[in-house]
Image (cartoon, rainbow, N blue to C red):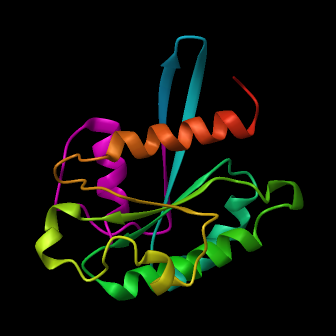
Amino acid sequence: MVGKTTFITRYLTDSFDQDIKATLGANIHVKDIREPDMRVKLQIWDFGGEEKFHFLLPSYASGSSGAIFMYDITRMPTLIKAKEWIKIFKNGLHRNQDDVPIFIVGSKLDLEHEREIKKGDEMLISGLDYSYEFLECSSKTGQSVDEIFNKMINAIIKKRNLK
């Protein structure tokens, strides 16, 4: 578990629940955000990370405006898995969606003392390139959670020329 659901829960409710169960399939969450000159309705899709749910992702990717893929900074294999999920996601995008903002987020920053993936080594380890933004957060403390979602919202608004 990399903490996708706790990340979303922290953003939506500003709370942390370490007893959240693994997501089976997909869960959908909605948050209304009011900007000074616009209203944004954010739909957040939380996909189960198990391989048996890979088949779901391409069909949902085609309607997405952005994506956040997570890994656990204390477990190297989770970063490699994120690369697989990104490939599956990108295969589901339409041709006109090739510039969908994609963020790769390292979770569990509160466990810095257990870190396996050094900050700055994400691209080297994952084999991903500079077209992705690499960020880190802690759902437990709330560190950088809101900032990551705000960056995603701003990237989507900019891509769609809404401001």
Front one among 73 and 118: 118
Residue 150 lies, with reference to residue 74, above or below; the image says: above
Q: Position of residue 110 (x, y in %)?
A: 16, 61
Measured as percent of width and height from the top left, residue 39 is found at 58, 19
Q: Please give the range of residues in magenta.
A: 1-29
Relative to 123, is 144 on the left or the right? left
Please, is residue 21 above or below residue 80 in the view? above
Quadrant where the image shows the C terminus: top right
Quadrant in which residue 128 is drawn: bottom right
Q: How many marks?
A: 0
Check if residue 9 falls in the magenta segment.
yes
Q: Quadrant of residue 2?
A: bottom left
Residue drawn 75% across and 55% down?
99
Residue at horizontal 18 percent and vertical 49 percent from the top: 16
Q: Residue furthest left?
A: 113
The vertical placement of 161 against 108, above or below, is above
Q: Is residue 6 magenta?
A: yes
Figure check: 113 above or below 104? below
Q: Residue at x 25, y 83 (%)?
A: 116
Q: Position of residue 115 (x, y in %)?
A: 21, 77
Q: Measuring 73% from the left and 51% from the top, which residue is drawn there? A: 63
Q: Position of residue 68 (x, y in %)?
A: 51, 58
Furthest residue in direction top, as rendered: 36
In the displayed orientation, state which residue is furthest to the front: 120
Q: Quadrant of the N terminus?
A: bottom left
